[in-house]
Amino acid sequence: MLNIVETEFENIDINSFFDLAKIEDEADAEIVVFTAKQRKMLDTVLPHLKASALQRYESFSARLKHLAELAKTIAHFPSLLERQRLMGSERTPTSLIDSLLKHQNEGDATLHLPSKASLGRSFLVTKIHTFATLSNIAKNIGEPESTVQDLKDEAVKMMYSLLAEDVYLNCVCDKTMETDLRREMAMSLLLLWEHRSDEAIDQIAPVLQNVWIARRKLAPAFGTMMGTSELLLISMQMEETWAHFIKERLGDEMVSHAMEEFLFGISTEQINRLRSILRERGIKAIGRDEVSEFLGVHIKTDAGLDYRDFYSMYTVRRDNARARARLGIPGPQKTLEDYFIQFVLQSNREKQKRDNFAR
């Protein structure tokens, strides 16, 4: 590990790498390349990196330039929030929302989404990796642990924007939800695609991150598989929003099953099969590391705090839920994250209605 000696570092403004102000002006502020908080992080670490590893500094600086140039390119694509004339037809935010609500084809929707949505997702993934890389660099050059953690947290927060995009798409296509709420979520999706930011993420991300951290601290006994004690331990450590969600929604059988999948790291089908195996063999409980042996296949039931682990395990549950919905198979047709984010958005909507009425 490289150690930083106490010395005076040249204060490096991130704008010295590229004309970021010009880029954001040309992009009409559609996509913010770096928030004020992120710029501060960069301005903190980069002078130290330049002093201790010049070649690495130059390589990372080039990466930042490419990221900004990608944002500039995306900005040149037609806005999703304005009236546009495309290929002989007119597109408006309302027509785009109507299209999202009506599109119910099975399979991957990638080719049905606006180009700006796909490009923006690539931009966000690149930005996530950039901050994750910088957190490793900061650790290697001896930055304070608080700085390293701030950079990791920023990468994790951006990962939840990817997750929220999936959830919004699921909800928009869910005909069991009221149409007005689906339209609101579709509008949130357009805003996310246009700006690559979402206000709801600031409220949702810390809660889900804390749930994930609490989950890792648990050592559930795979016996009754009910997860009651694990759930209580998690809930005791959570914010008011999470506690409210548990109180209001855990009585729903599908939410309860989605919670079990989240807690135990295996599908509802595998949970049911494991229950039967343990019951037949007269075994009361097994540990997490024994699950693969009993089911006869390798299953990753645990994961670290890496943002990639969280998103990977979420996508497995997401794909399973979509398959059940498509094939009419019993079990949760949404993930725990789906249910929670939907709950938060509905709660915010109801609060806004109450506030407007009070005026």
Image: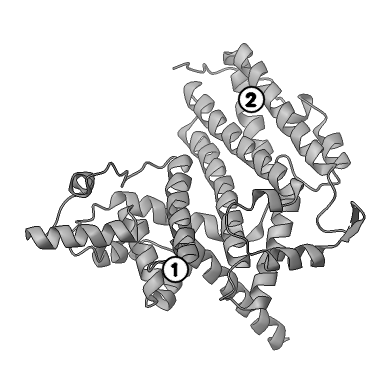
Screen quadrant of the N terminus: top left
Q: Which residue is mark 1?
A: 328
Decide which of 338, 141 is in the foreground and name it: 338
Residue type at mark 2 is Leu
Q: Quadrant of residue 177?
A: bottom right
Q: Residue at x 14, y 58 (%)?
A: 278
3D distance between C-alphas at marks 1 and 2: 53 Å
- Image height of 260 relative to 244, above or below: above
Q: Which residue is mark 2?
A: 46
Which element type, helix, strand or loop, lies under badge 1? loop
Q: Position of residue 222 (x, y in %)?
A: 20, 57
Q: Position of residue 179 (x, y in %)?
A: 66, 77
Q: Residue at x 47, y 40 (%)?
A: 308
In the image, taking residue 170 as reference, residue 190 lies left or right, namely right
Q: Quadrant of residue 268?
A: bottom left
| Mark toward the start of the polypeptide (1 vs 2) | 2
Residue type at mark 1 is Gly
Q: Is residue 35 visible?
A: no
